[in-house]
Amino acid sequence: MAKKTQSENFNIIATTLAGLEEVLAAELRELDMEYVKVGNRVVTCSGNLRQLYEANLWCRTAIRILKPIRQFKARDEKNLYEQVQQTDWSEFFDLDMTFAIDAVVSHSTFEHSLYVSQLTKDAIVDQFRAKTGARPSVDRIRPDVRLNLHMYDNLVTLSLDSSGDSLHRRGYRLQTNVAPLNEVLAAGIIALSGWDKKSPFIDPMCGSGTFLIEAALMAQNIAPGLFRRDPYGFEKWKDYNESLFEMVWNTAEAKEKRTPQAHIIGYDLDADYVEAARNNIANAGLENIIQVEQADFFETQAPEGQGVVVMNPPYNERIQSEDINELYKNIGDTLKNNYQGYDAFVFTGNLEAAKSIGLRTSRRVPLYNGSIECRLLKYELYRGSRKGGGEEVA
């Protein structure tokens, strides 16, 4: 791969979860990326090598940061094989390096992504074998180089995956509860809440603490990538610039705010979850930023003033609740009576039970938790008489 100058721009593709595209676009603009364009679970932009490294370190709602190397139309199997061989793969990795291909295929004459990745792999190893008499190995778990193939309507985009392991695996979680929230989803929900990173932030059903930790990382201006234990994909690239990445890393470390910026509080009824949350918080070095208590949400009171409440109550999908409608009714009553002046956000995959909250929503954002279709429901909890009617919420 020809050495690029640090300032030379190239196309970048950042993938995310459905519903978080605008949040990710804003993050990429923060990094001064150019030509930021929102797609479906993807944001495209243009940036240089430094910005590619920064995106991996700083983007809270990105899953992978990809660098496209080739785009072509594939009519059939033979054509796909030939097109893949038109790239000189020795520019990107050597014979002694392992590689893997992640393929996503939709609206194409090719039906199976596994078959497409197999065909692509064959084209690559055959090229090496023809040139050298030997072939590189595939390692699906920890490859040196991860390639991404995206095929839509037979249009193929081949990219280098600069992230390696998915960026949602931050590295701070030691323990999780039964249904832990994906870190990217948690960060996206907090961003969608519009929280100012200064007023109180409360998760009254905090589980293993993902919302709390993501909120603290935002408030303290800590790059989520700083917790990562595994190397990034780009660290094995032929144009990897170690001193540049070191500078990006050191700059990120220097931007952290040491003194607590906001009152961040978590409650959970289950002592095991409280312990898990505290362990994860300690692992992230945030014990002096986040307060977690064992408490029943229905008996809690919000701190004076205004703030944000974010919660992910059971849906009766993975975590079963005795009477889900009663649970959601109690959530509505507690918010109305004990959290006046706050904005509350309830993230749920049970839209029927959510109607029992009995408060008027001011916003409904469609999102997914894995394969479960969900809504992020916003309730503005006015003081005094403006407590909202009993309108349906979902």
Image: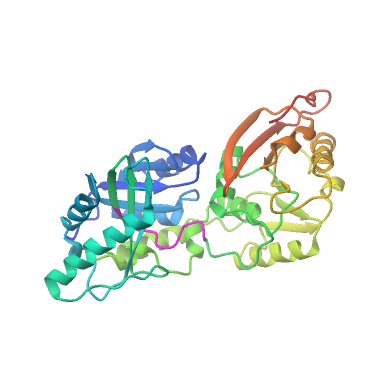
In the displayed orientation, state which residue is furthest to the left: 131
Residue 366 vertical placement versus 177 (above, below)? above
**Residue 59 left/right relative to 319:** left
Q: Nearest the camera: 379 or 57? A: 379
Residue 239 shows in this picture? no
**Main SS, magenta residues:** loop
Q: Is residue 102 one of those drawn in magenta?
A: no
Q: Quadrant of residue 272?
A: bottom right
Q: Quadrant of residue 34?
A: top left
Which residue appears at 48% of the width and 65% of the height? 228
Q: Looking at the image, how many numbered discs can be counted on the residues?
A: 0
Q: Which residues are magenta?
A: 159-169
In the displayed orientation, state which residue is furthest to the right: 299
Q: Position of residue 99 (x, y in %)?
A: 32, 67
Q: Position of residue 55 (x, y in %)?
A: 40, 52
**Residue 123 left/right relative to 334:** left
Residue 88 shows in this picture? yes
Q: Nearest the camera: 158 or 24? A: 158
Q: Is residue 168 one of those drawn in magenta?
A: yes
Which residue appears at 39% of the width and 47% of the height? 14
Q: Position of residue 30 (x, y in %)?
A: 42, 43
Q: Position of residue 372 (x, y in %)?
A: 61, 45
Residue 365 vertical placement versus 242 (above, below)? above
